[in-house]
Amino acid sequence: MAFLLGLFLGVVVGVGLVMGFVRSENYRSKKRSELAATVAAFSKMTVEDSRKILPAQFYPSWVVFSQRQKLNWLNLELMKIWPYVNEAASELIRTSVEPILEQYKSSILSSLKFAKLTLGTVAPQFTGVSIIEDDSSGITMELELQWDGNPNIVLDIQTKLGVALPIQVKNIGFTGVFRLIFKPLVEEFPCFGAVCYSLREKKKLDFTLKVIGGEISSLPGISDAIEGTIRDAIEDTLTWPVRKIVPILPGDYSDLELKPVGILEVKLVQARSLANKDIIGKSDPYAVLYVRPLRDRMKTSKTINNDLNPIWNEHYEFIVEDASTQHLTVKIYDDEGIQPSELIGCAQVRLKDLQPGKVKDIWLKLVKDLEIQRDRKERGQVHLELLYCPFGMENEFLNPFVSQSFSMTSLEKALKSGVNGTDAAVTDRTASLRKKDVIIRGVLSVTVISAEDLPAMDVMGKADPFVVLSMKKLETKNKTRVVNESLNPIWNQTFDFVVEDGLHDMLILEVYDHDTFGKDYIGRCIMTLTRVIMEGEFTESFPLEGAKSGRLNLHLKWTPQPIYRDL
């Protein structure tokens, strides 16, 4: 009996295992078929389909949908004719580039010329082309080019000390986007009057310098001087918004030339929670700001020693040539003394996002690289105040940073004449304008209305908050009354400050929790006075810096008494 029972159970268990195995295999086969069908469906998706399924805010930083079309046919033809291009273009490049290098050479160099110049055997590759549909009066085309060439370039360098050096330029790698503008469109063949060309975007430019028969590292400063000369020459003569104009048909094409279109007023207010780059102590941060990365147009702030939350409150002015494409770039460095400074982080603001005549107060998150933003490390934030003032809009708003004794139209004429080398009288007049520092004196009335959602500071989950108000350049302080046991206090108290220099002073509001034996810090608000000077008065809610939560509701009013002084 036991034998039969065991046999029965063995058969049942065996059949069950076989059935389970078959069922499992069928299920896995079905899943594989469904997965294969899904993959096949994804392979047939267009860019538009993927954008419908996954919104842009969920894309990883490395996902880019290119609008450019491939140019394989052009690359094949270019490879065929490249030996002839090399012969024809080498001398042309030599004669046209040498004067530019001489113009931008460093102060430690007395001469910089080509001893040898050939473009090598590797042709550049056009990786894409696109048409920009933003102008009905012309055609704008962008060509993306990549070149990892093997040219034979030898520079004949003469230093101020009379030392002659043959410098070889090796391992050139370049990736960029060139813009061609065919404008204006006319009814005469070839149907456009002129061609403008420019380097719209310089994605990569790498090269190596080597002294023939020696090491360039043994000559301190020479490598940096040559590299700076090359990069400045490219940036100031070819990089957008600079453009070269080639007339095709007779006519006046001055409207296509590069001209200033406005002024960007920038106030570097402060930074917070900067990454510490020092092993002992804290970083010594300073900032570098620019719209175009030219040495004479880049602005550098003062260094704040041993501080990860520096306050600068420094004002800078930048010329804008194309607000639709240019950016303001901010880079924060740690000053290492005699050693090279170490980058803490950088940020960028598109000028087209600024409303003309409207002050924009903005916090920017610092990143390691502006092109490839894969770094997840917290590097801190920088606080800027921006005001874009286009030329020709002086009747719609006033720029508080410009002396109102002269109109902005005069400034525009002077800047334009400076580019063309004419109208010296207006240039001299603007020079006298720039020698004046605008001092705006007035009374600032600050009404501390209330606070919202303050963090709990007491054991009972409450706080006894009060606000201390001060101006950065004044020693006097005012404070509100204490509101007991409230995370949403209401004060409605007004304080007046006589401000001697409104454009360069700051209002600081610190919120504390009152205790029997002292006070506990909650958070603060720091703000410049540019907006209230321009608007007269406004009511705004400001987040508390350094606090987990909380906002401060304020009303600011300005009563001006402008004066001017000569520097």
Image: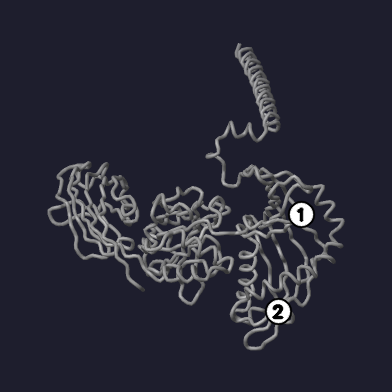
Does label 1 or label 2 sit earlier along the sequence?
1
Q: Kindly identify which residue carries mark 2.
A: 211
Q: Which residue is drawn at 75% across and 45% down?
A: 187
Q: Where is residue 180 in the image (x, y as percent from the top left)?
A: 70, 52
Q: Where is residue 520 in the image (x, y as percent from the top left)?
A: 21, 54
Residue 118 appears left or right of 98: right
- Looking at the rendered structure, the secondary structure element under dot 1 is strand
For residue 35, above or below residue 300: above
Q: Kindly identify which residue carries mark 1.
A: 125
For the C terminus, the quadrant is bottom left
Q: What is the residue that sits farthest to the bottom in this orientation? A: 162
- Looking at the rendered structure, the secondary structure element under dot 2 is strand
Q: Where is residue 354 in the image (x, y as percent from the top left)?
A: 46, 49
Circle 2: is it few (<14), some (14-19), or many (20+) Cα within 10 Å? some
Q: What residue type is labelled 2?
A: Val
Q: Is residue 439 visible?
A: yes
Badge count: 2
